[in-house]
Image (cartoon, rainbow, N blue to C red):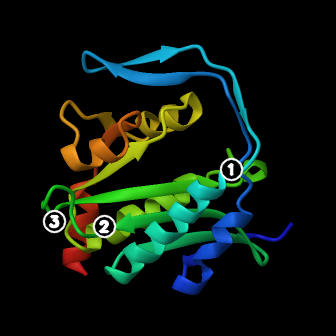
Amino acid sequence: MTAMSYRSLSKGEVPLIATIERSEIIDGRYAVVNGKLTLSALRHVVTGWNPSELTDHVDQIQHALADGGLAYGAWHESDLVGLSKLVVTGVGGDSSVMQLEPLHVSAPWRNQKIGKTLLAMVADAARSLSATSLYISSIPTRNTVDAYPRIGAVVLERPDPALLALELEDIHMALTLPMAAVRRKDEG
């Protein structure tokens, strides 16, 4: 089997996000109630990309790249099987808080640490730009939300008002970036 490769995406490669297999069986949906995650039963099958959502993602990623942001891809041979993006403009005007959005992995490639590797790439880039945390606005599905606390993300008591207005149903979280990695950068 060919090894996975990871690298930055160019603006011209962004439309390849359409090749990421988006199918999923959703078995629960979270909401934040009184500052706590509350899970409700939901069974829904996602069969692929919603065309308008796909267009929005491509536009947002290309806009972020034009603003100095970064996008990373996971590749199996010539196929894009995962993608992450770092928005570097600072959340709420705070340059120490950058945004991870989106993070996608093709259905056949999930649970193989591809998302974790892409997230690590975003975190390393954010740290190199002096960020101390990542803002995560996650779709409220069980599988997606459950992944972030496992890596240390916490639900925000007060989400950024502008990002909350854009994604009212999302679960807004923050991931503190370890200072040890920042020190290593400064020492080198």
**Residue 21 showing in the rendered view:** yes
- Can you tell which quarter of the image residue 114 is in? bottom right
**Which residue is label 1 attached to?**
112
Mark 2 vs 1, N-terminal side: 1
Q: State the residue in front, 23 or 73.
A: 23
Say whether disc 1 or disc 3 marks the residue closer to the N-terminus: 3
Where is residue 73 shown, x and y percent of the image?
Answer: 59, 70
Q: Nearer the viewer, mark 2 or mark 1?
A: 2
Where is residue 169? Give x, y as percent.
40, 33
Tell which tag, 1 or 3, sits nearer the viewer. Answer: 3
The amino acid pointed to by label 1 is: Gln
- The residue pinned by badge 3 equals 95
In the displayed structure, would residue 31 be above or below residue 152? above
Relative to 157, 173 lies left or right? right
Q: Which residue is mark 2?
A: 126
The residue closer to the viewer here, 146 or 58, is: 58
Which is nearer the N-term, disc 2 or disc 3?
Answer: 3
Q: Position of residue 141 (x, y in %)?
A: 54, 31
The crowd level at tag 2 (other Cα within 10 Å; few <14, some 14-19, many 20+) is: many
* Residue farthest toward the front in the current orientation of the protein: 52
Residue at image coords 23%, 66%: 182
Left or right position of 45 against 165: right
Which kind of residue does numbered mark 3 sit on? Answer: Ser
